[in-house]
Image: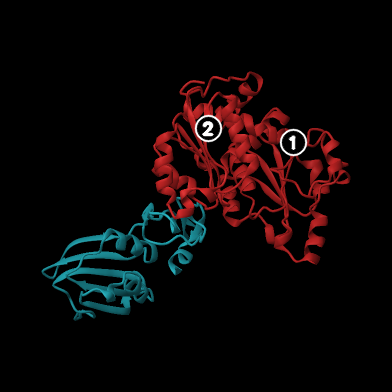
Chain colours: A red, B cyan
Amino acid sequence: MENRLYKRDIISIADFNRNDLELVLETAAELKNSPRPDLLKGKVIASCFFEASTRTRLSFETAVQRLGGTLIGFSDAGNTSAKKGETLADSVNIISSYTDAFVMRHPQEGAARLASEFSSVPVINGGDGSNQHPTQTLLDLFSIRECQDKLDGLKVAFVGDLKYGRTVHSLAQALCHFGAEFTFIAPKALAMPDYILEELDEKGIKYRFSDSIEETAPQVDIIYMTRVQKERFDETEYKHIASRYILDVDSLKEAKDNLKILHPLPRVDEIAVEVDKTPYAYYFQQAENGVYARQALLALVLNEVV
Amino acid sequence: MRKKLQVEAIRQGTVIDHIPAGQGIKILDRLQLLDSNASITVGFNLPSKDQSHKDIIKVTSRMLTEQEANQLALFAPTATINVIDNYEVVDKFKMALPESLQGAFSCPNSNCITHNEPVDTHFSLREHKGDVRLKCRYCEKSFSKDIVAEL
């Protein structure tokens, strides 16, 4: 398959077509089965986390090291020139001149796109505010394909905070390439934003709304859980809402055999710990898959042929 | 029947015609025409063959910039621009919605990186259910044109 990702910036899942997504997933599967500790040999990768994110950073850094690359960077902008008032544009301009690729996370939306305009090397977005987190979406897709043996025509339920959850938005957008059907389960205040629903309408994607995980579980292949954040509601309201959006073993009584539960983590209390022992739980494998998805992306961006 | 011009002809400059009635004052404001030194003649709520009523703005000795024309297309898509030289129309064109707008408006998303960095905003435009939506190239959020213009 032609490597369209070679030397490309990885900013938004909206920039990927179906072939690009499949290329990353194929490569991730190959790297999971057969490690390649030479693919980034001699390459220096900047890992610049202007905002802390332990799991994403460690996952990226593990991916670089497993491919034989070297890392420079920081895990918090507090000790960098950003604190002195240096623009992101200048920081990127300089750091990219030292390296072969620039992995970054930033608290402001659009930071990665902007960085790509000032970087002399490919920029990989590790999350920009509430906007995009394309590598999370790639690892989600990889995990879905791995546990269902396919991506086409799946029925996927999204549960929890669908308003602010960028992982939900990007995954829904990516699954449109594979003809998915969606069920959205969320409190009114955290419903899927209109602009995403408009995009689904334009693409002819079927979706429905539900109030009940229990009633939805028998109809879907994937339940993608997210956390309803306490701070968005007053205490009484939260208690009322939270009880309806907690996934426990009881709500899986009628689930399909192939159902798998995903969650971008960290989990708080929206998935009962008893669910971990059921065959439906897939969120820990999903987190592990982040390393393979990121290895695949780095390998493809930095090598014409993998 | 004797025809009489309801707004005085200009010798040289730009006539923005077929502005939807009621929008003329907003166009004056949006394009900051009153802040310029140009002489301006305006007509509000004039009879129109095509639109029943229209507004018209005549600006002496001044051409619209591309940025101004784009903004006009956004808020008065039915408008036509006539370029006048020696009382004659030497060029005439209809407004067309541009594919993108650069540097014309701030992004309404207060957490968009464009508020802190040395770049112009950049919106791609599309029509949706009779509204024009502007999508920020950076933060990827979509906004109604009225929200973008309010700022």
- The residue that label 2 is drawn on is A71
Residue at horizontal 30%, vertical 63%?
B68
Chain letter of mark 2 equals: A
Tell me which residue sits at (56%, 47%) in the image.
Answer: A76
Q: Name the spot of residue A110 as percent of width and height, x first.
A: 49, 50
Q: Position of residue B47 (x, y in %)?
A: 32, 77
Q: Nearer the viewer, residue A167 or A177?
A: A167
> In the picture, residue A30 is in which quadrant?
top right
In the image, what residue type sits under mark 1? Phe
Asked if labels 2 and 1 touch by Cβ distance under 8 angstroms, the answer is no
Q: According to the image, label 1 marks what residue?
A: A284
Q: Residue furthest left?
A: B86
Q: Secondary structure at mark 1?
A: helix
Q: Earlier in the sequence, mark 1 or mark 2?
A: 2
In the image: residue A122, left or right of residue A240: left
Instruction: Using the image, name the chain to which the residue with label 1 belongs.
Output: A
Is any part of residue A137 visible from this angle?
Answer: no
Tell me the quarter of the picture where residue B123 sits.
bottom left
Circle nearer the viewer, 1 or 2: 2
| Three-letter code, disc 2 | Leu
Which of A271/B15 is in front?
A271
* Residue A10 higher or lower than A128, as above or below: above
**Residue, x 49% and y 48% (percent of image)?**
A80
Please give left or right for residue A208 compared with residue B35 in the image: right
Q: Residues within 10 Å of mark 2 (few under 14, many from 20)?
A: some
Compared across the picture, whether A256 is left or right of B121 comes to: right
Quadrant housing residue A175: top right
Label 1 – label 2 distance at C-alpha: 26 Å
Q: Which element carries disc 2, helix, strand or loop? A: strand
Q: Position of residue A141 (x, y in %)?
A: 64, 35
Q: Are marks 1 and 2 on the same chain?
A: yes
- How far from the left and from the top, in percent, is residue A32? 65, 23
